[in-house]
Image (cartoon, grey):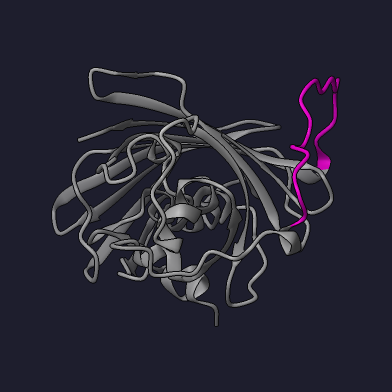
């Protein structure tokens, strides 16, 4: 079993409630990654929903979740329709609610309707042409779970070189699980939060806890590398947004994300 499958596994304990354990393998400076936690919550919710696929999920991080500890996930299907159903999902540790999310589900396999795509997959070098970034980047335990191929502040940091002062707070990079596990639809919540923040191109040693993370799931990913593009245009009074796009190996847009975070 892959690390991702093992660490996002949940077991039903009663109607709408699931038990899991928050692994420390997805930690950032001792705190579990927000995308990893959202992926675990969606794994629980998928078992309860009238439709098979998450289409959008928004998580609010109420307090710090603790690694290495058990958690309980509650799922309530609060709306069911012909095409969509919506869930309220909460993650608890003990009696304290750590995360609250809303997710809308549908069926991507039967989706149809008008299509007009203006954006396009970034034109970058193939992953084989970019030197891999080794895991264990400072306090980022999560970096040991992925194969990264990007030219950003991350590549300078891992090489021990100073980060250029003129880097823009945006980057494009390839990513995949480093144990051979292919990306799944719910794992896109993790991939949307798997790179260090784009603001690291300007402030490489900052602490950037997530306040809210929204992921739009647009297609089931094809096997192979994922190509991500992240950017931050506004850092104001210590608060920032980060917008993301994720494309699969077939050139399909599979997810969009927006994260609202604090920088300290």
* Nearer to us in this view, 80 or 164: 164
**Which residue occupies 24% across, 71% down?**
68
Q: Find out whether residue 33 is within the magenta segment.
A: no
What kind of secondary structure does the magenta stretch mostly adopt? loop
Q: Is residue 263 above or below residue 13?
A: above
Q: Is residue 227 above or below residue 230?
A: below
Question: Residue 132, image x and y in percent?
Answer: 59, 66
**Which residue occupies 19% across, 49% down?**
64
**Magenta part of the chain:** 110-126
Question: Residue 186, image x and y in percent?
Answer: 57, 53
Lateral position of residue 180 relative to residue 212, left or right: right
Quarter occupied by residue 200: top left
Question: Residue 203, image x and y in percent?
Answer: 32, 37
Lateral position of residue 108 relative to residue 138, left or right: right
Looking at the rendered image, the quarter that the N terminus falls into is bottom right
- Of all residues shown, which one is farthest toward the left? 95
- Of all residues shown, which one is farthest toward the bottom? 1
- Tell how many labels: 0
Q: Find out whether residue 125 is within the magenta segment.
A: yes
* Nearer to us in this view, 31 or 233: 233
Looking at the rendered image, the quarter that the C terminus falls into is top left
Q: Does residue 214 appear in the picture of this structure?
A: yes
**Which residue occupies 63% across, 30% down?**
81
* Nearer to us in this view, 171 or 167: 167
Q: Does residue 55 appear in the picture of this structure?
A: no
**Which residue occupies 29% across, 24% down?**
239
Lateral position of residue 11 relative to residue 30, left or right: right
Quarter occupied by residue 182: bottom right
Question: Residue 112, image x and y in percent?
Answer: 85, 31
């Amino acid at each position: 079993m892959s690390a991702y499958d093992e660490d996002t596994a949940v077991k039903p304990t009663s109607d709408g409630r699931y038990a899991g354990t928050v692994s420390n393998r997805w930690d950032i400076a001792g705190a579990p990654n927000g995308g990893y936690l959202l992926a675990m919550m969606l794994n629980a919710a998928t078992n309860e929903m009238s439709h098979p696929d998450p289409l959008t999920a928004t998580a609010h991080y109420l307090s710090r979740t603790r690694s290495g500890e058990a958690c309980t996930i509650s799922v309530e299907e609060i709306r069911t329709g012909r095409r969509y159903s919506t869930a309220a999902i909460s993650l608890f540790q003990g009696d304290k609610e750590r995360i609250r999310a809303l997710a809308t589900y549908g069926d991507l396999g039967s989706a149809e309707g008008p299509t007009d795509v203006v954006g396009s997959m970034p034109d970058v070098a193939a992953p084989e042409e970019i030197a891999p970034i080794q895991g264990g980047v400072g306090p980022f335990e999560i970096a040991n779970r992925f194969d990264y191929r990007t030219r950003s502040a991350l590549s300078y940091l891992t090489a021990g070189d100073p980060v250029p002062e003129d880097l823009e707070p945006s980057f494009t990079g390839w990513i995949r699980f480093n144990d051979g596990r292919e990306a799944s639809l719910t794992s896109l919540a993790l991939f949307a939060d798997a790179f260090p923040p784009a603001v690291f191109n300007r402030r490489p040693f900052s602490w950037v806890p997530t306040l809210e993370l929204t992921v739009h799931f647009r297609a089931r990913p094809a096997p192979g590398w994922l190509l991500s593009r992240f950017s931050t245009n506004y850092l104001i009074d210590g608060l920032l947004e980060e917008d993301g796009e994720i494309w699969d190996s077939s050139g399909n847009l599979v997810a969009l994300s927006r994260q609202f975070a604090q920088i300290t």
